[in-house]
Image: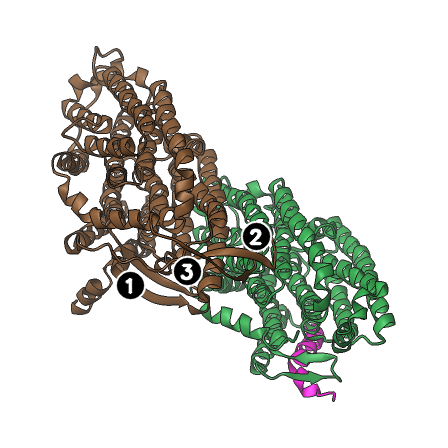
Chain colours: A brown, B green
Amino acid sequence: MQAITTFFWEHPLTVITFSPLLGALILLFLNKRDVSLIKSLAFIVSLIDFFLSLHLYFYFQSDTYEMQFLEKIPWIPDWGISYQVGIDGISLFLVLLTTFLTPLAILSSWTAITKKIKEYMVFMLLLETGMLGVFIALDLFLFYVFWEAMLIPMYFLIGIWGGARRIYAAIKFFVYTMAGSLLMLVGILVLYYLNYQTTGEYTFDLLELMKTIPPPAIQTWLFLAFAISFAIKVPMFPFHTWLPDAHVEAPTAGSVILAGILLKMGTYGFLRFCLPLFPDATIEFIPLISILAIVGIIYGALVSMVQQDVKSLVAYSSVSHLGFVMLGIFALNTQGLEGGILQMINHGLSTGALFLIVGMLYERRHTRMIDDFGGLSRQMPIFATFFMLVTLSSIGLPGLNGFVGEFLVLVGTFQANKLYATFAATGIILAAVYMLWMYQRVMFGQITKPENQRLVDLNLREVIILVPITLFIIWIGVYPKPLFQKMERSVQHLISQVNRPRIIKVEREVFLVSGPNKMVYWTNVPRIKE
Amino acid sequence: MINLSLLTPEIIVLITALIVLILDLLPWRGRKVLLATVGVLGTVGALLITMGQWDLREEAFYGMVAIDNFSVYFKALFLIICTLTILLSINYITRGGIDLGEYYSLVLLATFGYMFMASGTDLITIFLALEILSLAVYILAGFMRHSPKSNESAFKYFLLGAFSSAFLLYGIANIYGVVGNTNLKDIAQYLSQEAALKNPLFLAGMGLLLVGFGFKVAIVPFHMWTPDVYEGSPTTVTAFMAVGTKAASFAAFLRVFFYTLEPLKGQWVPVLWLLAAVTIIFGNTVAIYQKNIKRMLAYSAIAHAGYILVAMVAGNDLGSSSILYYLLVYSLMNLGAFGVVIIVEKKEEENLTISDYRGLAYKHPMLSAAMSLFLLSLAGIPPTGGFVGKFYIFSAAVSGGYVGLAIIGVLGSAIALYYYLRIIVYMYMYDPEKEFLDGPVPFFSAAALVITAIGTILLGITPARILELAHYSISYLGH
């Protein structure tokens, strides 16, 4: 026991990341007929993981931007690949969001999943390991391994337990995201050799790679290679077409994880890789990305408005919300970035909760069409309360979490570009329109369908799922200061990385892009001290 | 110096092949398992001795055969392939009614040929090796005597194979005519003169060699035989040639082009660049439309030859050692995938279309899990060996300055993902409609699957040691 505790203190991130994997391996050896044992064990494993991850929150030091809980073990030394993990104020919250949402997602599948429960729980736990790995990896190779490996369990979750068009959705999801990330693979390799040519060292260590900046002309291409892969994941307009299919067809827990965590990998990728590695390209691409983000905000909102299916309404609203996140990130100032990061968490909470709520409705009525409902608030008062709260959070009502994030994003954007902020602000109005309109049609009015007369309100398990989320929604809305404190240093460091001074000089002849023996100008940047 | 003792592994394989033939005469019913056991023992024995030859750096037969790390690495690979093939065959050939002793003997003889493909340092040795292995495989392809498809496959393979051998031989003759010798060292020496690089006769010879090798490794446009031959041959033979013949031909291809003809790089790299791009795009695109799983794996094998060409184009040490690593991973994952096909296949070509795999996961979860692993590895998804292999190859391409080709390669992988996933879709996302196997999974086949599956995972998670070996294997090959 002592040894385990010591190991945890020394390697908290490794333990947190791989304990779901361990749980999944144990599940494999259980008899598939012990359904309740399998479900409980999966839930307990993910819950323990959440409590373990609180360690990170409490022992996180807010006064430094350096990576914390760092671990580094050589993996393929010949290529400079190591198992290097660590978190800063940006990834901390995404790790916590993952460990927080996974047990809730598992709990929400308690009665919704009826077939092949063992496999389902195994894939859920594998997925958690994959997602956590993406957020903690500080080695590009390791990151890529997690980034791709995580697709496998999600693919199975959509494909086996999804809705009617699940196979189409699963393949589309997999191929779409994979196609993007393969380009990133080439980008990673180019970056790796560029770094070798400057420093003479083979390394995939992100912290090392950040110390040099590729020449601007190449940065553009590298930025694109990375950005397309991340933009597909976010998803940014016009790469969003996989999202409605995957979200609508996935089982409830799958949608919660997809919206709550997977989409954040894209925005996280921009923060962790694109901005610090390719600062010149980042600045160059501000207009394009901001405009696409605004198009996404407005387009997502307009399309949400006309959806007949509650689940696809929530799915399209994600396109809109993630547009805000991207806009905030590319405002490249403290408010915008902090707002963007907070909005990532907020979206995880409120959209995750919305998918859970839709799932609860679907379990009762086996339909998600808005027209099939109406007047539910009389039959299900507790449900109505939670639904209202989450809806308001998603709209951004002051006092709830959404407001803080969106407000900061708009403040940041306003400082950067007033026109962008003006257009983006319309998205908030539209959000109120589609969310409240949907709420009104589903919950208020007369009960028109006889089936709705017999609906029962939430049971204890469902209340237990929603209470923690609503608590966080209110907490962040009222008192977000602890969060900002923890992310502040990292955000400032990120901004300084983008704005760092560049010394340009010709380094030597290199082989690249246009073939051997081509002269390439090279920028070499000393490490910045704050 | 003849140094016959250096060839102990090859001699063991040859003698085992003969012993198997003799033992088949025993009037005893259970002798088929005995034959397989003898075969496995022989190959494993040869494997152990081969491993002992690591770092030996010797020559035999007056420089016609080299015992260097390169050949040791490949010979070990061929012996592993041979062992796995025998394990997979035991049950299959009994079911197929082709359990004749010659089967194992021919597999061993082909392996004997493979081994000389890797160690031959003279064009004549390489040609002889190619003929030995080809003749054995021609017969094996037609081993399902009662099946018209198998006959067709053998006949096609034989005609086109003979044709390509002629190309190779003509190429050798041209080079001999110019150099006056067929030894690779002498050719390299000849090429060290500036004027030699422009000799049209020599260049024509090189082009003909390229065609000959291109046929054997099955790259576009010399791939025409592959789908039909792979589909018609007994599945165990398909597996054997998809990995063995390909790896052996690449071994010789690599030694001749990468090292001996290195000074002529400017001539052959552009050609291979084009062939690599076309092979990857064509192989992957056509594989999407296949309904028969063997045909699909045939096109996938073509595409994989394309990836290996990418590494050849890269033209540096990284590229060459990435080929060695990739061929090991490729052999394991492909044998694994074929292994599942072999187990699931029934008599009269039943269970060979992709839709036959409907619901396999809910009847045979372990078998499907293994198949998914192999397919994901073939698609290059981490954490499998296939990913590390592809990563290595594209890394070599980028380091050689061929970013464009690397991009074509990764886009090909994205296409490939679609058809590999389709099998997983059928296995997992539909409900089963029938029983797949008549009994439990046969023991020996299961053993082969376990070995390949563990290998595929380990090469993905802890590749460092094997990467080092692959890198070390090419270190003595001179420029």
Q: Which residue is mark 1?
A: A71
Q: Which residue is mark 2?
A: A513
The answer to which of marks 1 and 3 sits earlier in the sequence is 1
Is A395 left or right of B114, judged from the image as shown? left
Above or below, B63 relative to A167: below
Identify the mark at residue A204; answer none if there is no mark.
Answer: 3
Rendered location of residue B454, percent (x, y)? 46, 63
Mark 1 secondary-structure assignment: strand
Image quadrant in which you'd find residue B51: bottom right
Rendered location of residue B84, percent (x, y)? 57, 66
| A92 or B66, nearer to the observer | A92
Let me know if residue B81 appears in the view: yes
Chain containing mark 3: A
Residue kind at label 3, given as amino acid type: Phe
- Read off the magenta span: B1-27
Image quadrant in which you'd find residue B236: bottom right
Rendered location of residue A462, percent (x, y)? 19, 34
Mark 3 secondary-structure assignment: loop
Is B463 left or right of B230, judged from the image as shown? left
The answer to which of marks 1 and 2 sits earlier in the sequence is 1
| B433 or A343, nearer to the observer | A343
Residue kind at label 1, given as amino acid type: Glu
Q: Could you tell me which residue is drawn at 21 percent across and 47 percent down?
A: A488
Chain containing mark 1: A
In whole angstroms, how far apart are the C-alphas of marks 1 and 2? 34 Å
